C-alpha cells in the first residue's frame, strides 16, 4: 500500500471515529427549546415492530422514542408521552429504543439492566422506576429496582447483569440511532417521520393520523 493510500485510509478511520464520539457526547443542553427536523424513514414500520412496546394502542399512531435513562430531558418527556396516550385513547402506541450517551456514566448499565428486566416481562415497570428515581442511578443497586419492578427471578436478573447478556440489544439500538442520524436523546420516529429534538409535544401530535 502506498503512503498516500495509507494516509487516506487513516484519515477515513479517524473521521469515522470522531463522528461516533461526537454522536455519543451530544445532548440537548440547558433548554427544552429544540430545533426539529422531519424526514421520512423508509423502513420505519420494521423498526417499530421490533421495538419494545411501552404503551400500546391500535396502531393508528406509532411513536418510537430513542432514549437514555440518565438524560434529564428524557425523564421529562416520558410522562408527556403518557399524556398524549391518555389524550388520544387507544390511538397511540409508544415504543422504546436505547440511545445511551457516553457522557452519562450509568446510562449503558441502566439500559442493559432494563433489558434484563424485560426478559422477565418487567420492562415497562423498570423503565418507569428509573425515570422517576433518576437521581438514584448508580446509587441504588439494579437488583433493588428489579424487585420494585416485579422481577420474579432475582438470580436470573443478576446473572444477566453480570454477563452483560443484553449488551448486544442496547448496542444494536445505538447503531440504529447512528444510522438514522439521531444525535440527541430523546429523538423520535412518529408515523415514519424522524424528529430530532422538538420545541413542543404538539409537534408530535401534528404528525398523527
Image (cartoon, rainbow, N blue to C red):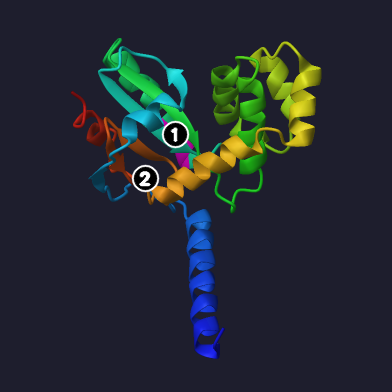
Identify the secondary structure beneath mark 1: helix
**Residue drawn at (37%, 45%) of the image:** 32
Q: Is residue 10 above or below residue 179?
A: below
Crowd class of label 1 (few under 14; some 14 to 19; many from 20; radius 10 Å)? some
Crowd class of label 2 (few under 14; some 14 to 19; many from 20; radius 10 Å)? some
- Residue 51 is situated, as x and y percent measured from the top left of the image, at 46, 28
Q: Which residues are magenta?
A: 73-77
Q: Which residue is mark 2?
A: 32
Left or right: residue 92 versus residue 123 is: left
First-in-chain label (1 vs 2): 2
Marks 1/2 in contact by CB < 8 Å: the verdict is yes
**Residue drawn at (51%, 44%) of the image:** 174
Q: Which residue is mark 1?
A: 76
Left or right: residue 189 versus residue 110 is: left
**Residue drawn at (77%, 35%) of the image:** 163
**Front in this rendered view, residue 181 or 187:** 181
**Residue drawn at (44%, 45%) of the image:** 177
Residue 76 lies in the magenta stretch? yes
**Front in this rendered view, residue 136 or 53:** 53
Quarter of the rendering occupied by the N terminus: bottom right
Q: Main secondary structure of the magenta part?
A: helix
Quarter of the rendering occupied by the C terminus: top left
- Residue 16 is situated, as x and y percent measured from the top left of the image, at 49, 66
Residue 59 appears anywhere in the view = yes
Amino acid at each position: 500500500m502506498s503512503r498516500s493510500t495509507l494516509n487516506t485510509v487513516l484519515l477515513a478511520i479517524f473521521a469515522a471515529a470522531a463522528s461516533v464520539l461526537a454522536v455519543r457526547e451530544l445532548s440537548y443542553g440547558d433548554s427544552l427549546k429544540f430545533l426539529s427536523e422531519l424526514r421520512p424513514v423508509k423502513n420505519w414500520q420494521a423498526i417499530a415492530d421490533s421495538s419494545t412496546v411501552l404503551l400500546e394502542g391500535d396502531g393508528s399512531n406509532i411513536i418510537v422514542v430513542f432514549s437514555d435513562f440518565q438524560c434529564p430531558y428524557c425523564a421529562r418527556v416520558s410522562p408527556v408521552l403518557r399524556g398524549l396516550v391518555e389524550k388520544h385513547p387507544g390511538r397511540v402506541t409508544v415504543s422504546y429504543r436505547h440511545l445511551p450517551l457516553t457522557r452519562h456514566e450509568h446510562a449503558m448499565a441502566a439500559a442493559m439492566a432494563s433489558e434484563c428486566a424485560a426478559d422477565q416481562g418487567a420492562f415497562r415497570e423498570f423503565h418507569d422506576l428509573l425515570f422517576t428515581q433518576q437521581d438514584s442511578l448508580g446509587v441504588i443497586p439494579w437488583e433493588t429496582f428489579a424487585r420494585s419492578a416485579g422481577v420474579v427471578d432475582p438470580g436470573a436478573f443478576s446473572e444477566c447483569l453480570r454477563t452483560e447478556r443484553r449488551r448486544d440489544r442496547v448496542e444494536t439500538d445505538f447503531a440504529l440511532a447512528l444510522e438514522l442520524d439521531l444525535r440527541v436523546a430523546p429523538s423520535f420516529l412518529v408515523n415514519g417521520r424522524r424528529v430530532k429534538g422538538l420545541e413542543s409535544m404538539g409537534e408530535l401530535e401534528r404528525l398523527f393520523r
